Image (cartoon, coloured by chain):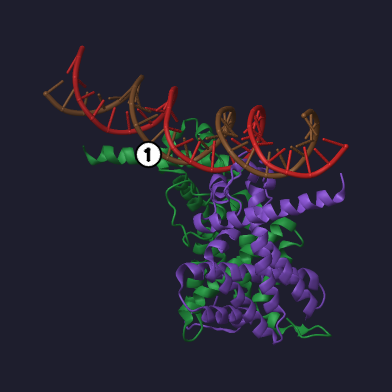
Chain colours: A purple, B green, C red, D brown
DNA sequence: AGACTCTGGTTACCGCAAGTAACATGCATG
DNA sequence: CATGCATGTTACTTGCGGTAACCAGAGTCT
């Protein structure tokens, strides 16, 4: 068997895979996570076993799907993080980019944050493994790297940067999630409040009269 | 029907309910979330329909279970938050309390953060509803309240406190989750790093040589 | 005593989704 | 033409959430 044919097949399989992902995307965006494999297959105009041939199991499909969106989001975050502006502006731009993304497509966001579902059988021993969504981890690591690269944090900067990376991402995520649900203020206000928090306004604030402060 | 009997029945039902929750707890702690109703029923020495009579559906059981643990955790957090010490020490104590809790019982922690699972049928239209774990929301609200009560934040303090409450909780959660998975440093170091972040060290840090800072 | 109902329990089932086995078909190559 | 091999299908198994229908014992009313 010559390589050309093999390549052709590879190509074809890859194209098919992309098509299937497109279809899966449509269904997941329409029906939310928990969309059934049957539904996805139907949307793609085929039947279940093909999906399983391509992605192994539901987890595989969802992982592939999540990777696409995660990559896309990370790209735009990187852009905001690399913009030519001072630190505060960059932080605000990054926060705003993230919030814009989840605001524009809450379904995608929700899917990315809850990819796990229940594991039906076999893989017991989950124990402590598999915590939050991979998206959060990746964002945290990415941010940690940027922080370590660009900030002078003295000794222990590596650990510190990682803690901060994950911490800031978590802050952004939780605040965004809450904000998306309650819409208590404009996006700009939220961004400003979060940046203020990161800029130490919590430590700087005065106590209220009549008691020791938080 | 006299009231005494009714009260007796109430009592008995409540005791039974508590027993069932104990059993469910054991199973969930052993098998993780996704523990089947059958397994829980078996552990309790009975069969499924009884569980359904008591808790309605799986969500009901899990909610009841989660409420117990959430209440307990919130109590200890409140204690740390109310300790007689200055602000920084309180913040560190609260972070440490949370981290101790998730360190001591990661299974419980994991269960609390992933109660949702997939909604099997009917309740489509989830759309944007039901985001992160209720635990996070409750912690966020609680913290927001404390912040608003005790800090003088000027105009817009209500919104600001809420944003910060949810943001800080998210930071704590994400950092804790990551830390629990990788164990890159001691708990004390993590606490210190997070408190530093909240104390504005990010804004205060100098740029590294050779480029604009983050 | 015997009928009545209330409460806690069981068995047996439905529907549905994940995942698989076995079978069919089209198309390139020896 | 026969042989692979990829692509697709139908039909099945298994396991779980959830429910309907039935069952037994204890207290109550007449």
Quadrant location, the C terminus of chain A: bottom right
Q: Is residue A142 left or right of residue B51?
A: right
Residue at figure coordinates x 52%, y 78% from the top left: A187
Question: Residue A211: image x %, image y %?
Answer: 50, 79
Apparent side of residue A50 relative to residue B72 in the rendered image (left or right): right
Q: How many C-alpha atoms fall within 10 Å of the one at disc 1: few (<14), some, or many (≥20)? A: few
For the question of whether residue B56 can be seen, the reply is yes
Front one among A34 and B134: A34
Residue A78 lies in what quarter of the image? bottom right
Give coordinates of residue B192: x percent, y percent.
70, 70
Q: Position of residue A199 (x, y in %)?
A: 64, 82
- Residue A148 picture quarter: bottom right
Nearest to the observer: residue A118 or residue B153: A118
Above or below, comparing residue B208 to residue A99 in the picture? below
Q: Is residue B150 left or right of residue A163?
A: left
Q: Residue at x 37, y 39 (%)?
A: B13
Considering depth in this image, is B2 or A152 the residue closer to the camera?
A152
Q: Position of residue A104 (x, y in %)?
A: 53, 70
Question: Circle 1 — which element?
Answer: helix
Q: Which residue is mark 1?
A: B13
């Amino acid at each position: 068997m010559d390589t050309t044919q093999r390549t052709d097949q590879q190509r074809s399989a890859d194209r098919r895979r992309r098509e299937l992902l497109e279809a899966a995307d449509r269904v997941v965006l329409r029906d939310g996570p928990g969309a059934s494999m049957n539904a996805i297959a139907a949307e793609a105009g085929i039947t279940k076993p093909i999906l399983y041939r391509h992605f192994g199991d539901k987890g595989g499909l969802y992982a592939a799907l999540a990777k696409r969106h995660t990559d896309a989001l990370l790209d735009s975050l990187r852009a905001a993080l690399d913009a030519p502006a001072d630190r505060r502006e960059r932080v605000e731009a990054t926060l705003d980019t993230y919030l814009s993304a989840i605001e524009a497509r809450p379904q995608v966001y929700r899917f990315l944050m809850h990819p796990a579902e229940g594991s039906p059988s076999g893989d017991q021993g989950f124990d402590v493994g598999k915590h939050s969504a991979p998206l959060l981890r990746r964002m945290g690591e990415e941010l940690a790297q940027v922080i370590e690269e660009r900030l002078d944090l003295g000794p222990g900067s590596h650990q510190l940067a990682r803690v901060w990376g994950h911490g800031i991402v978590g802050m952004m995520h939780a605040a965004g999630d809450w904000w998306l649900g309650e819409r208590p203020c404009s996006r700009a206000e939220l961004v400003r409040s979060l940046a203020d928090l990161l800029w130490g306004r919590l430590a700087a604030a005065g106590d209220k009269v009549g008691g020791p402060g938080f």
